[in-house]
Amino acid sequence: MPDQAGFNLGYIAYNVMPQIKGEDHPNPLAQLKVRQALDMAVNKQQIIDSVYQGAGQLAVNAMPPTQWSYDTTIKDAKYDPEKARQLLKEAGIKEGTEITLWAMPVQRPYNPNAKLMAEMLQADWKKIGISAKIVSYEWGEYIKRAKNGENGAMLIGWSGDNGDPDNWLGTLFGCDALNGNNFAKWCDKPFDTLIHQAKQTPDQAKRTELYKQAQHLLKDAVPMTPIAHSTVYQPMRTSVQDFKISPFGLNSFYGVSVK
């Protein structure tokens, strides 16, 4: 059965606003050290083995490796619950501090089982003293409320639309997307300047350099934890020749034959 690493990304978005809408206390996720702690406490490989049943590639960046301009020099923080605990202590976060963890009510190409993933994250974060309350809504309500800024940590994802880096960086983390798909509510002016410059530049080599700089800013700010790129499969008869899976889900049969 043909397969390839999907042109998709499942991730955790952290609402970085000082106060989450509907709550009456400061938002712990607004602190960089808290987001860093949560990020390094996630056992990604265990999630890929259980949620994706091995049919996923560990994600490091805010776009898939098959996307041009992907920066291979970016690395994940090492899985380190003890260091995560230390960061929380430095941030003044008390043992048992509660955050909300939103779990999608539906299967998506980038996340086949958000409920299970949320439960695994809940267990990971409990080890560092964070109590994650799992929240879910009907899919339309889930997105509506998140766009309104009511989410805490949130399971979400994206499948590439057009093959352009802006479809990831701008669509998901640009300031222009604060009322759209930027569920982290993260608006960073240096990052935004880079992606706007890249979008307006015709030279692909220059665009690549600008997008790589933007990827580093995003990684350092930790408005999200990338989890996985799910593997895409295409069942077909063994007699079909020269078929290639489209990263966008729209398969072309040009050049395909049957022996």
Image (cartoon, helix red, strand yellow):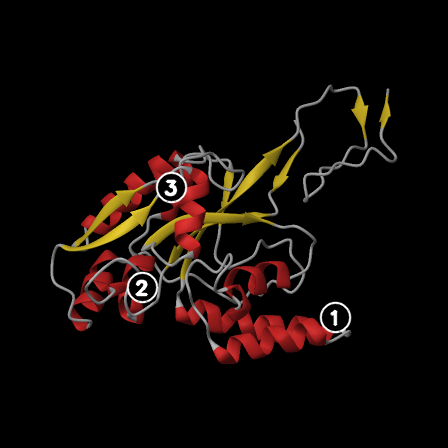
- Residue at 35% of width from left, 60% of height from top? 78
Question: Does label 3 or label 2 sit earlier along the sequence?
Answer: 2
Q: 115 left or right of 6?
A: left
**In front of the other: 252 or 175:** 175
* Residue 117 image position (x, y, % from top left): 35, 40
- Residue at 68% of width from left, 44% of height from top? 248
- Which mark is drawn over residue 47? 3
Q: Could you tell me the amino acid type at mark 2?
A: Arg
Q: Are marks 3 and 2 in contact (CB under 8 Å)?
A: no
Q: Could you tell me the amino acid type at mark 3?
A: Ile
Q: 34 left or right of 208?
A: left
Q: Secondary structure at mark 2?
A: helix
**What residue would you read off at disc 1?**
204
Q: 182 left or right of 83?
A: right
**In front of the other: 20 or 15:** 20
**Measured Cα–Cα span from mark 3 to mark 2:** 19 Å
Question: Does label 1 or label 3 sit earlier along the sequence?
Answer: 3
Q: 198 left or right of 110?
A: right
Category of crowding for the residue at label 1, using alpha-carbon neighbours closer than 10 angstroms: few (below 14), some (14–19), many (at least 20):
few
**What residue would you read off at disc 2?**
35
**In front of the other: 225 or 78:** 225
Q: Could you tell me the amino acid type at mark 1?
A: Gln
**In front of the other: 54 or 204:** 204
The quadrant in which residue 259 appears is top right
* Residue 191 image position (x, y, % from top left): 52, 75
* Residue 7 image position (x, y, % from top left): 61, 47
The quadrant in which residue 166 appears is bottom right
- Which mark is drawn over residue 46? none
- Residue at 61% of width from left, 71% of height from top? 211
**Viewer-side label of 3, 2:** 2
